[in-house]
Image: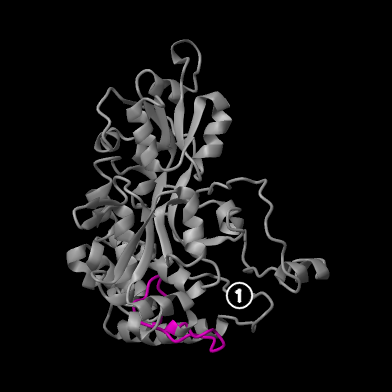
Amino acid sequence: SFEYNTPPLIDPNPLLIMCEGGGVLTTFSLLGIAFGIIGIILGSISLKEVREDQVSEDELLDLLSRVGLSDFDTEPTAAPDNSAPDRNQDTSETLEAILDRGYLLCGIPDGQTGFAIRNGDEMVGFDADLCRAVAAAVFGKSEDHIEFVPIASAADRWRFLQDKTVDMLARVTTHTMERDVNEPSVGSGFEFSPPYLYNGLGFGGVPPFGGCADRLETMGECTGLLICVNQGTTHIPIVRKLFAKSNVLPVGSASELYVNLIAGKCNAIAEEQTGIADRVVRVQGYEGEYEVGTTQYSKEPLACVTREGDAWWSDFVFWTIEALLGADERGIKQTSADQFPETPHFGDDYSQMFQNAIRDVGNYGEMYDRHLQILVPRSDLNTINNGTSGLIYSFPFGSLLTVGKVPSPGGTIDAIRTRGHLKCGITSRASF
C-alpha cells in the first residue's frame, strides 16, 4: 500500500546511480533547494517563538510534505524526466478495444461459490466484483459496461486471454513463476496484479476419507481413498506428488469436484480453503457427512491476469486492485469513496479511477465480508498489515521443468552476456 503511520526519514546519503539507458540524475540539487525552503520556513517559525526554537516531528513532517519529500503526496508533481513515455490511452491496445465496444470482457469462474455465481440476473462473488472495479475505473461505473465470460475449465483460461476473448482474468488464478514467464499451454507469459487472496490447497471429504487425505494416509481405514482434483490447476502436480495415481481422479472443472463427490465417484476433494469449506459443499448440493482437513499443502496467491505486451493496461488493472487494498487500510468505504486521492498518472480521463472503483464495489474488506467471510473467516495473510506483521512472501514457482522462451538477440540478457558483466544501479550508503 502507500501510506504509513510515520513517513520515513530522509536518506542521509541520497546519491542515486542509474543503470545505462538514460541520464544520470542526482538528488543533491533537489535536496538543496528543499532544505533551503525548509530553512526559510523554520526561520519564520522561530520569529513566532516556537517552543525553545525547536520544531516538533509533526511540524517537520508537515514542512517536508510542503516541499514534496513526504512518503505520500496527493498533489500532482511534474515528471523530472521529459523523456519518459506519455501514458495516455493511445498507448493501450486493450483499452482502445474496450472503449470501442463500450464494455469490459472479464473472464471469471463458472459457478464457483464466493467468487462468481449467478443469483437471478446478477453475477455475485469476489472475482465478479474485481471485474466491476476495473470496469468502473475505466467507465466511471460498471453497470452496462461489463460482460462476464464464465470459463468452466481452468485449462482454457489462458487461451481465452491470449486470443483476446477476454480483456482480463479474475478467475481464482495462482501467480507462479511458470505462468509469469511462460505458460506452456499457450507458449507465453502473462502479467499479474497484486495478490487479492492468499489461499492454500487442502482436502475435505466423506469421513474418514477427508481426514485420511489430510494426513496423507491410504492404508487401514483409509484404504479406498479416491481424491477428485481439478485439471489445469496448480493442484494437480501437488496431489500427484502426495498420492499414488490410483488415489487421484482428475476432473474437468471445479463444479465437477462436487458433482463427483455427490455421485460417490470420489470420497474426497482437493481444493483451496475457499473450495473445501463446508458451506461451499452444501451450496453445491452435497447433503451427506463431511469433514474438512486442517493442513495447507501449497501457497496459492490469487491474482488478476492480463496479457503481456500492454504495460499500460496491466498497470491500470494492477493499481486498481491496489486501490481497493489501500482504501481498506485507510478506512475509506464505498460510501466515502470520494476521500480517496485522485491521480493524473493514467491521464485526465482517469483521474478519478480509484474513487470510481471503490464507489462501485467498496474496499477490499467490504468485498471480503460480502463474499468470503462466511466461507473462510478473514485472518493472517489476508488482513491489512499493521506495521508489525511480516511482508516477505515467496511466490510458488510452478514447474521448474517447463522449457521457456530463449532471450531475443540484441536484448538485455544478450547485451550482458556479450559484455561479460552486469551493470547494476545501487545506492551509496552503509549496508546497501
Question: Which sits in the foreground, 156 or 198?
Answer: 156
Q: Determine whether, in the image, residue 262 is placed left or right of residue 402.
A: left
Question: Which sits in the foreground, 372 or 154?
Answer: 154
State the image coordinates of residue 158 (x, y, percent, origin top left): 50, 57
State the image coordinates of residue 65 (x, y, percent, origin top left): 37, 77
Residue at 75 percent across and 74 percent down: it is: 410
Quick check: is 84 in the magenta stretch?
yes
Q: Determine whether, in the image, residue 335 is placed left or right of residue 70.
A: left
Question: Which sits in the foreground, 341 or 223?
Answer: 223
Look at the image and give the residue range highlighted in magenta: 67-89
Task: Say if 47 sits above or below 305 in the image.
Answer: below
Q: Determine whether, in the image, residue 45 is placed left or right of residue 172.
A: left
Residue at 28 percent across and 72 percent down: it is: 145
Of the 4 image quadrants, the one containing the N terminus is bottom left
* Circle 1: element type: loop
Question: Which sits in the foreground, 401 or 147?
Answer: 147
Residue sitting at the far top:
220
Circle 1 is placed at which residue position? 16
Q: Amino acid at mark 1?
A: Leu
Task: Say if 247 sits above or below 1 in the image.
Answer: above
Residue 54, visible in the rendered structure: no
Identify the image quadrant of residue 88. bottom left
